[in-house]
Image (spheres, helix red, strand yellow):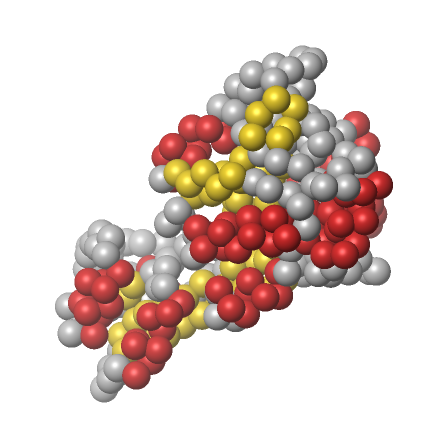
Amino acid sequence: EAHDDYFRGRSPIDRLIWRKIPEDSARIAALKTGEIDLITNVAYHQLPSIERAPGVKVDKRRGLRVMYIGMNTFSTPLNDVRVRKAINYAIDVDLIIEKILDGHGVKVPGPYGEFVWPGIPEGVEGYPYDPEKAKKLLVEAGYPNGFSKIHTSKGDTPDKGVPRDKEMDLIFHSPKGRYPLDFEVSQAIVGMLEKVGIKARLVVDEWSNFLEKYYGAKETGLYLLGWGNSLADAEGILPTLFASYGRGWYLKDDKIDELVRIGASTFDRKVRKKAYDEVYKYIVDQAYWGFLYDVVWAWGSSEDLLWIPRADETVDARTFRVKEA
């Protein structure tokens, strides 16, 4: 209900009702009939159906969520930078965006795109699709025929949920239904890796099971994940996902720790930019992720509803207005 004494003024919308409708087709049908006024996370292949319907519209916005391939860099051979670079060269990100996401993604060369401050450092271009270069790097790393197994760490590493000193299948762990077409993207990536000789077994989990393994430091090989940076600042991702004092379950690099601490310990923008640009370049050079794309989000809404889609995926009802007749 609208609050009369809200400090920014009373909302022009008297009452909001939030409904959970898991089935995509049911949500779209409810939107078209006027039963509801706004739906989120619309599947890309269903956008034309909304665009053709009278009285409703589609809103799109590039988000602050970056999709990436995480790696347990304590496992052999993922502890070899040549192998990690080979993984990046093996993946045709442009093709994934075009054919699977129907154009609803923006390739990024590193851990975040230009919408996150201080942006992409000058000169960083990332990894183009080059399967032949991927194969050469695997040969240099001692895997002329590729690989399908990993060997877990022997020492006291932060991946506490992983059995020690064990040979295991290379797993590519994917959620299903958490991000737009995440399962289909994972299938494509596994196929691309196999073409250069990296044979990963695709394991798919519902989101709760996926998180249990991820947060439990049980990932042994590769996994698909997304990170939403609501700060739109490098500090919203680097300390958490790359510094060993954050979620450093699968990576420990003293240089990253030092640079991130410098950037996070001052308000001086020049110092912060220098530190974050340097760590960005270093992360790309070390290929600590498989770098993919920023998500483009889609919403469906009534033409009578005026609102502002946000890059951080928040549906801010304070922006809602009803079009005057």
Q: Quadrant of the N terminus?
A: bottom left
User: Which residue is painted at 43% across and 35% down in the image?
Assistant: 210
Q: Quadrant of residue 74?
A: top right
181 horizontally vs 12: left or right:
right
Residue 199 in percent (x, y) is at 60, 42
Front in this rendered view, residue 88 or 58: 88
54 horizontally vs 35: left or right:
right
User: Which residue is painted at 74% across and 59% down in the image?
Assistant: 130
Front in this rendered view, residue 274 or 227: 227
38 horizontally vs 166: left or right:
left
Is residue 280 in view? no
Residue 285 in percent (x, y) is at 80, 46
Q: In the figure, 276 relative to 260: above or below? A: below
User: Which residue is painted at 64% across and 29% down in the image?
Assistant: 150
Residue 156 in percent (x, y) is at 67, 13
**In the current view of this chain or complex, which residue is farthest to the front?**
145
Q: Quadrant of the C terminus?
A: bottom left
Q: In the figure, 14 relative to 263: above or below? A: below
Residue 170 in percent (x, y) is at 58, 34
Is residue 90 in view? yes
Front in this rendered view, residue 45 or 278: 45
Q: Quadrant of residue 8?
A: bottom left
User: Which residue is painted at 45% across and 38% down in the image?
Assistant: 203
Counting labels gives: 0
